[in-house]
Image (spheres, rainbow, N blue to C red):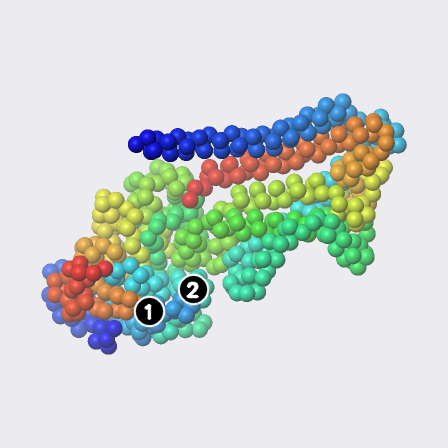
Amino acid sequence: MSDFKRIIAKRKRQDFIFNIVGIMCTLVGIVTLGALLTDLLMDGLTRLNWTFLTSFPSRFAARAGILSSWVGTLLIMLVTALTAVPLGVSAGIYLEEYARKNWVTNLIEINIANLAGVPSIIYGLMALGLLVYQFKLGQSVLTGGLTLAFLILPIVIVATREALRTIPQGIREAAYALGSSKWQVVRHHLLPYSLGGTMTGIIIALSRAIGETAPLITIGALTFIAFLPPLPVTTQPPFLSIEWLWSPFSVLPIQMFNWVSRPDQDFVVNAAGAGLVLIVVTLLLNAIAILIRYRVRKRIKW
Amino acid sequence: MSAQLSKSVDPSTATIERPDYSIETITSAAKITVRHLNFYYGRVQALFDISLNISERIVTAFIGPSGCGKSTFLRILNRMNDIIPATRVEGEVLIDDQNIYATGIDVVELRRRVGMVFQKSNPFPKSIFDNVAYGLRINRMTSSKRELEGCVEQALKDAALWVEVKDRLKQSALGLSGGQQQRLCIARALAIRPSIILMDEPASALDPKATSKIEELIVELKKQYTIVIVTHNMQQAARVSDVTAFFLLGKLIEVNLTEKMFTNPDQKLTEDYITGRFG
């Protein structure tokens, strides 16, 4: 009997120890992040004001701002999203719902999973060779957006497929049994029901892309740019212009990289300010993802 | 399995008086005729040389132990197995004298004529109204909003669900109880006015009360529809069906009038199964 008690006591002790270890591990992550954020806030908040957001970079730290880089980030993300989302979602739907399951699709599947893990600078090199030199798209917003689209394409495809897989087979059968064509099953059921998962995946992918620096530097994004791309709307018909696609650009992480590498301490503070803006945008994107997921889950429970 | 086992009995040759049906009803023209059907999942053969007639406007029940192929066979009748990769069909399935596995057959059109209700109720995560209206909409069967509403109402009435849901048509179908969801699925199948309804263990996930509602409904529906039902529950087969087919290990062992099947089956295997000696 005492043997039995001893064993129970031992098990409880094991439980307790693991609890402590677990808490410690979690704390390492949280405290580090907290320290980083606090440091960033302390440095960056002093610099964060309207002028900082609306000024071009300058060789004087006090006058320098992030206007051209946040506009650049915005435009790049626009191109990335408009390319990666339709391509990735379509590819995901094709692979999951249409493609026959054979060794070719297996091979594609494995490669997509691998592509998601390829270092981003490799994508930069590919884009430099293909988009800049081969297709002569220049070191432009278009090139930058497409590069990041390539980068996140595998993530979007995988997210789409995962989201489709959570839909019970019974829903597909029900739709087919009522005389739906395959496209109707996809359009009326699978797409709307998987929207939550797909959107979450897309936004996570975009928030990864927004912080990417290496591939954009590789294709030759500028580190100092004192003008904005042409406006997408014009006063003359057809009132829309795609001139901005061919404009040179910079983005927030590149601006930060540029500033921290300067010897002047004031520029490092500028970098913290830009970093703060970047973090806020990323957190905002993640908040949207969580909100969408929450709303869809509330509506659809399998 | 000996050759004798795979011999099936044609219900049209079985003669037994039934109180509520004249023999003419039972022997009415075959709605579905299956000839020498073999079915394969990849390299595994699941059904062996099945031949059988299913008559119009009666309830035909498929019974047999799990994995005997009765559900697979049911899903052959509206080509539902097409969506499972690497399946293969040999033989003929005639519905209204048309081979549904012939080339050039429009599967979408076939499934409009042959409705299906599944084992696990599977309403779309849409409103009750939209669930029933879905088939009508995609098949463009109504020309006005009023006509659509009329058809939805009729389908819900036919499925004995109207009274319970008429005040909450705009609410999500996922808020209904299990039994209500299953009747909604029946209404959804009825809405597009098929002539045949396939039911794959429609009551297996329901409590006894909901089950008896579904069974009453089936008996009511056979006035207008040809119904084929797969069931695990032999009492259920006895209660609702007119003709019963017994499957074992992918083979059709016996087809007979339900009354005869459950009192004096022709095959020894059938008797063993029905009396609970195996299965």
Say which chain tag 2 marks.
B
Looking at the figure, which quarter contains the N terminus of chain A?
top left
Q: Does dot 2 land on a helix, a strand or a loop?
A: helix
| Residue A291 visible in the displayed image | yes
Looking at the figure, which quarter contains the C terminus of chain A?
top left
Numbered badge on residue A178: none
Structural crowding at the residue carrying mark 2, measured as other residues with C-alpha within 10 Å and reported as few (<14), some (14–19) or many (≥20): some
Marks 2 and 1 on same chain: yes
User: Residue B224 occupies which quadrant of the picture?
Assistant: bottom left
User: Residue B254 occupies which quadrant of the picture?
Assistant: bottom left
Residue type at numbered disc 2 = Asp
Q: Residue at x 59, y 60 (%)?
A: A108
Q: Which residue is drawn at 80% across and 43% down?
A: A249
Say which of marks 2 and 1 sits in front: 1
The Cα atoms of the two marked residues, 2 and 1, are separated by 15 Å
Residue type at numbered disc 1 = Leu
- For disc 1, the marked residue is B47
Viewer-closest of B232 and A232? B232
Residue B196: % across, % down: 31, 61
Query: Outermost residue toward the right?
Result: A59
Structural crowding at the residue carrying mark 1, measured as other residues with C-alpha within 10 Å and reported as few (<14), some (14–19) or many (≥20): many
* Image marks 2 and 1: residues in contact by CB distance under 8 Å: no
Viewer-closest of B247 and B241? B247
Viewer-closest of B30 and B8? B8
- For disc 2, the marked residue is B82
Instruction: Say whether residue A276 is left or right of residue B105.
Output: right
Looking at the image, residue A17 lies above or below residue B46: above
Residue B54: % across, % down: 26, 67
Q: Which residue is drawn at 37% across and 55% down?
A: B192
